[in-house]
Amino acid sequence: MPGKGIAMSATAGLFERHRVIDVDTHITEPRDVWTARVSKKWGDRVPHIERIDGRDVWMAGDERIGTPGSTSMAGFDGVIPDSPATFDDIHPSMWDARERLAFMDEQGIDAQVLYPNVGGFGSGSWLRLGDMELVRECVSAYNDFLIDWTSADPNRLIPIATTPFWDLDLALGELERCIAKGHRAVNFCNQPQDHGQPGLASRHWDPVWALAQEAGIPISFHIGGGDIGSLMVDTHNMGFHANFARVSSLIFVDNAKCIADLIFGGVCHRFPDLKFVSVESGVGWLPSVLEAFDWQWRNGGVTDDHPEYDLLPSEYFRRQIYGCFWFERAGALNAIEQFPDNILYETDYPHPTCQHPGPRTPAQFPRDYAEGVLGALDPGVLDKVLFSNAARLYGVK
């Protein structure tokens, strides 16, 4: 039933004393996102919902491209691959903007940053549609939909532009269009080489970084932007649930590689005013990885090749890069202690392992988690992590 397991927690502390920006949530795209915005000439090749064996399924022609229920799991009494069957079984806050705002009020959350589902977390899933004109229309339609959706309250619902990274000229044109419409950040593929494109360290992408830097908006790298489909194949015969948990944990490593490419490849050096966000990748690993970066940087002679690099990796990170957390405990506290100006809070609502109650984590309301894990932090640090770091990035007032 809609709303099952999504009542407000009785505990209120931190979320009453501090404003909160949830920097990673997802929209369950409504049925008509593409059918209402993409040219009719494409017929049923346009992404649309069909009811198949009692379940709502996203279809493009004869191909299944996803199900709304599999990414709408908050409060659902079950675990992947089981999921809500139809839109009737999905809480309306997942697909309706007014309901999302009401839900945020219940949870004590000021603003949410919004990411997609159907087109993939780094946009690469759109390439499955084949015809590049159709792909272009679908990307633009989603970006236009997001501006429409967030118009319910543009200071609380933060749109992030989807990037057609496979065509640089197209990407630049689309991003210019989106920035003019009010998108607050660029969602970019964290592993473009998985889709036959140059890696992030390549100067091929410098025009994108220059555009974002000039506009004063950050670049987001959401986990799962690479070839996640091949990772989900259970080649070790460990079983679906074990493999799902394995992949969901290890795709954090993709963002560690992403950060390494940005720093060692000189992107941070060339674009010193540009901010980058590692989304849904956790933060507990950051101190260890950055310590390794600094050690190898010093002892590997990096500045022999690049005398222009004037900072250590950890210093570039402090200046320009942010990480997001939603479930960690000791690991999050260690990262916050070392990088209080670079850590952001998220819930990943309403994904399968989001920070909301489910059958395996009945007490995991965001406010309860924050109270238990973050409650002892200095109020000034708490303000940074829960609100002000993100407010500066996304222009939240």
Image (spheres, rainbow, N blue to C red):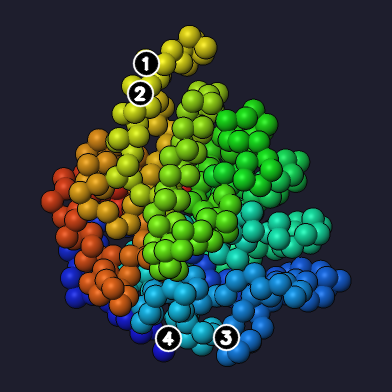
Residue nearest the viewer, comparing 42 with 289: 289
Q: Secondary structure at mark 4?
A: loop
**Residue 273 falls left or right of residue 110:** right
Mark 4 vs mark 1: which is more N-terminal? Answer: 4
Q: Position of residue 42 (x, y in %)?
A: 83, 70
Per the image, the residue denoted by label 2 is 294
Quadrant housing the N terminus:
bottom left
Q: Which residue is mark 1?
A: 298
Residue corresponding to mark 4: 2
Q: Secondary structure at mark 1?
A: helix
Tell me the distance, in whole angstroms, between the alpha carbons under discs 4 and 3.
16 Å
Q: Nearer the viewer, mark 2 or mark 4?
A: 2
Q: Residues within 10 Å of mark 3 (few under 14, many from 20)?
A: some
What whole-number distance in Å separates the C-alpha atoms at marks 1 and 3? 56 Å
The tag earlier along the polypeptide, 2 or 4, is 4
380 vs 45, left or right, is left
Residue type, label 2:
Asp
Near mark 2 (Cα within 10 A), the count class, few <14, some 14-19 or many ≥20, is: some
Disc 4 crowd, CA 10 A, few/some/many (<14, 14-19, 20+): some
* Mark-to-mark CA distance, 2 and 4: 49 Å
Q: Are marks 2 and 1 in contact (CB under 8 Å)?
A: yes
Quick check: 273 above or below 146? Answer: above
Q: Which residue is mark 3?
A: 55
Can residue 289 be seen in this snapshot?
yes
